[in-house]
Image (spheres, rainbow, N blue to C red):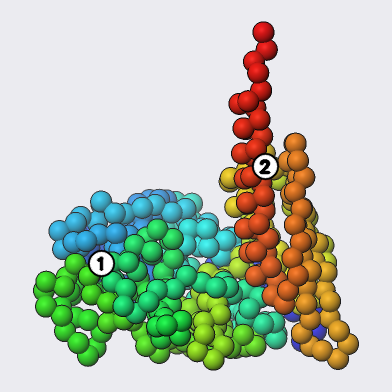
């Protein structure tokens, strides 16, 4: 399939109505306890369960359950939260954007009068299968992800999940990748504190999650190499119960790609309010191009939260491919303009996402330093008399 054809296919997926992709709502009984809700999630292999209330819809996900130390006695009303419903007839891009923003794997669908079903990220991602091309997995992966040692207590993993708002944590031993722990493993243990993995049992005194995270980790997580394509990685994720894939070279972890990362390929790009965003020199591959645009928009949104006076954001991508070589280097420049200053930073390397991560960190430091210097000068300035 040509680049133009793939690009048109992406846009067709984004603009396609979700109506034929809606499935029955996974609804919790009105008298359900958190323990029963967890049992329902395990039985249906789901991440969240819904509580429809007219056009509103409550949700309890594994993330909410993870916050509770005693799911046997806590009432569902104490942890339920509400998320916007996707309107019937909305596009795939709109649904994917909502799920990415709220970090959920399914969203309720409303016809304007009541909740009529749900749309799942696996269903949306299934639309991409076989149509992505050969773009590398590293173009959408999260590079240098946070990890935890096998010997660290489960409480540490739980705290990281709640603080960082993610659901997958690679496990290492002396810098070698040895496994993966997710919110599912920890939440399941909260329901049955005497069960740890499939081969060991811990006494009731260990119910406070003070045992090593290595005891409950998945020792055979889904993995691929940095040279793998997004197509191959997505196929592996969709064909297994896994919700992420780890990118490793030899025994060393390079990156992680979750369902949320895959969703950036079809999610409608949300503009930053009041900030024009420009990017030129995008890669020819349409999927890599979409991933790059999504990455830059997320960066500008992050910066805008800290520096709300940003007037404009620009990025220039220069490709340095040599004849006869499939892989080339990139030079990325990001320019941020505020009412008083203009900030610019450039970085060169092999992977576009990693370059944007480096630039974001440097720009935050540069802009923060400038802001602190200005405030210091204003404090030292003598008052007018």
Q: Picture quarter containing residue 13?
A: bottom right
Q: Residues within 10 Å of mark 2 (few under 14, many from 20)?
A: some
Numbered disc in front, either 2 or 1: 2
Which mark is drawn over residue 49?
none
**For mark 2, what is the residue?**
370
Q: Residue furthest left?
A: 204
**For mark 1, what is the residue?**
37
Q: Residue furthest top?
A: 385
Residue 179 at x, y = what percent?
40, 84
Report the quarter where the C terminus lies. top right
Q: Which of the two residues, 83 or 368, is positioned nearer the viewer here?
A: 368
Q: Secondary structure at mark 1?
A: helix
Q: Residue at x 40, y 79 (%)?
A: 171
Residue 216 at x, y = what percent?
29, 81
Q: Residue furthest right?
A: 323
In the figure, 101 relative to 341: above or below?
below
Residue 131 at x, y = what percent?
67, 83
- Is residue 248 found left or right of 296 in the rendered image? left
């Amino acid at each position: 399939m040509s680049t133009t054809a793939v690009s048109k296919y992406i846009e067709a997926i984004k603009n396609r109505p979700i109506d034929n992709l809606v499935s029955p709502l996974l609804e919790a009984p009105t008298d359900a306890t958190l323990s029963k809700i967890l049992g329902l999630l395990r039985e249906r292999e789901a991440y969240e369960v819904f509580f429809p209330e007219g056009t509103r819809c409550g949700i309890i996900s594994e993330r909410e359950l993870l916050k509770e130390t005693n799911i046997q006695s806590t009432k569902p009303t104490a942890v339920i939260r509400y998320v916007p419903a996707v309107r019937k007839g909305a596009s795939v891009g709109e649904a994917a954007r909502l799920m990415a923003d709220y970090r959920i794997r399914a969203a309720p669908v409303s016809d304007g009068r009541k909740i009529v079903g749900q749309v799942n990220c696996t269903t949306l991602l299934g639309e991409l299968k076989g149509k992505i091309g050969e773009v590398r997995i590293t173009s959408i992966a999260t590079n240098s992800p946070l990890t935890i040692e096998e010997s660290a207590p489960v409480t540490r993993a739980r705290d990281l999940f709640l603080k960082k708002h993610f659901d997958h944590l690679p496990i290492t031993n002396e810098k070698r990748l040895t496994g993966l722990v997710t919110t599912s493993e920890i939440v399941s243990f909260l329901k049955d504190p005497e069960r740890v993995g499939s081969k060991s049992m811990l006494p009731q005194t260990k119910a406070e999650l003070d045992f090593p995270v290595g005891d409950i980790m998945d020792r055979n997580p889904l993995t691929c190499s940095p040279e793998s394509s997004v197509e191959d990685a997505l196929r592996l994720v969709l064909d297994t119960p896994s919700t992420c894939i780890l990118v490793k070279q030899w025994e060393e972890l390079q990156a992680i790609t979750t369902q949320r990362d895959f969703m950036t390929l079809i999610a409608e790009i949300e503009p930053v309010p009041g900030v024009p965003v420009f990017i030129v020199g995008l890669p020819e591959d349409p999927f890599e191009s979409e991933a790059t645009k999504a990455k830059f928009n997320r960066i500008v949104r992050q910066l805008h939260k800290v520096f709300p006076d940003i007037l404009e954001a620009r990025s220039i991508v220069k490709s340095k491919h040599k004849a006869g070589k499939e892989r080339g280097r990139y030079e990325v420049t990001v320019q941020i303009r505020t009412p008083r200053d203009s900030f610019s930073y450039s970085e060169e390397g092999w992977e576009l996402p990693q370059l944007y991560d480096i630039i974001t960190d440097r720009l935050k430091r540069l802009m923060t330093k400038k802001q602190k210097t200005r405030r210091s000068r204003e404090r030292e300035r003598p008052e007018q008399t």
